[in-house]
Image: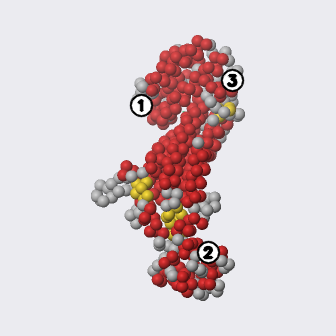
Amino acid sequence: MTDTTSSQPAKAWSGRFTEPVSDLVKRYTASVFFDQRMARQDIRGSLAHAKMLARQGIIGAQDLADIERGMTQILGEIERGEFGWNLDDEDVHLNIEKRLTVLVGDAGKRLHTGRSRNDQVATDIRLWLRDAIDQILALIGDFQKNLLDVAEANAATAMPGFTHLQVAQPVTFGHHLMAYYEMSRRDAERFADCRKRVNRLPLGSAALAGTSYPIDREFVARELGFDEVCYNSLDAVSDRDFAIEFCAASALLMTHLSRFSEELILWMSPRVGFIDLADRFCTGSSIMPQKKNPDVPELVRGKTGRVNGSLIALLTLMKGQPLAYNKDNQEDKEPLFDTADTVIDTLRIYADMITGIRVKADAMRDALKQGYATATDLADYLVKNGLPFRDAHEAVALAVRAADVKGCDLPQFTLDELRAAMAHVPGAAERVKDDVFAVLTVEGSLASRKHIGGTAPEQVRAAIARARSSQD
Ligand code: ARG
């Protein structure tokens, strides 16, 4: 990108003013440093507008040809990094329009007929955001594809499921990963839904009230691939709810990946040791030679903060604004760009990182031996043999206490020991038979949860198949 230089007082409205703004004010009010990212969208919007003006007889065919020629050159200059962005021309819109006028003369000056920067900028942001959403949707697809592969390879890998971070019941690692698949599916739905409201055309609203020229907004909408036009000019130039929605969808996506990251970090801690992450996502320590730190998931967790912050920034930006356009809205871009950049980079890196997870199935299984993960299965067994659930709960609580005292897990009891442990609950001991050991095993516990949404390996595979078929 070229340097943004300042040389003379601003000209776009200068006839009205008797003195130029100070350099500080110029810098304070300018947005060209950051809104030049929308240059391609700005040119695309201008070309559609010019085409419509020519079709409606508002500018001549030669004007349109000149504008198209000039814009082609400008696009080339921008792409080659040769465009001279100028602080005096405040923003991306005025920079491009000024250059166009230098290149093609009066035709350049006619481009802004029936248009204002207010509807121009609203159009540019929507075009920009639509592209960002499409990129994000494709990246969520990549993330999901890789996640499904790891889940499938681990559809039957047993691990403890936790509540309160205490061992609760056995689940499979594949089932655990599929929880994140479901979150990402809702994230994709939210972005796709947000896209519908992004994809409406503000152009034609002009400064705030519309324009007296015989414009054809529907033509411009079709040219730019918008689904429809915005139906109120005041609303079209001023509201940024579509950007806020995008940031809200982004905050939720990052929240999901932040939770996932927290688990990866925990699982990678030697105290837990369920997984290892590929070296390319970790760094060492400058002082402790033994360290391998999960920096990438930690940063995903950390960057969730800035995405949440951007959502609050935009909500706060909007909340006190009277209709219609106010310059406050210029502040919408940096949080929006930063949010899209963060989400895009995070998804890219995450899709790759998932493929580098090395599962330590033995450690997961060892962890299942602590915490009486099949206690609920034992209670359910007693219930199926006729004991009321509350009594079964109490009987198993007593068995767990006895196991604690003995220092063993439930399946390690003999039948007699198990019965003796429950003796204080009437009707419990006699309901325990030899077949109890089938339900006390991890495999028995997993296989029994075989309804839709359960952790039985067959159900995890079915969930993965369902997910794959919805991806095609
Ligand atoms: N740079 C401005 C923005 O980002 C463009 C619109 C300015 N309009 C105006 N009337 N000052 O919102």
Q: In the picture shown, does residue 64 fall above or below 472?
A: above
Among the two numbered marks 1 and 3 on one chain, the one whose residue lies closer to the N terminus: 1
Among the two numbered marks 1 and 2 on one chain, the one whose residue lies closer to the N terminus: 1
Indicate left or right for 7 with 41 as reference: left
Would you identify the image quadrant in which residue 388 lies?
bottom right
Whether tag 1 and tag 2 are in contact, CB under 8 A, the answer is no
Q: Of residues 212 and 421, which is closer to you in this image?
A: 421
Task: Say whether mark 1 is within 8 Å of ligand 1.
Answer: no
Q: Position of residue 71 (x, y in %)?
A: 52, 21
Alpha carbon distance from label 1 to label 3:
35 Å
Whether tag 1 and tag 3 are in contact, CB under 8 A, the answer is no
Q: Position of residue 356 (x, y in %)?
A: 42, 51
Q: Which residue is mark 1?
A: 1
Q: In the picture shown, does residue 415 fall above or below 275?
A: below
Q: Residue at x 50, y 50 (%)?
A: 149
Q: Residue at x 50, y 26 (%)?
A: 95
Q: Position of residue 312 (x, y in %)?
A: 56, 49
Alpha carbon distance from label 1 to label 2:
69 Å
Amino acid bearing label 2: Tyr
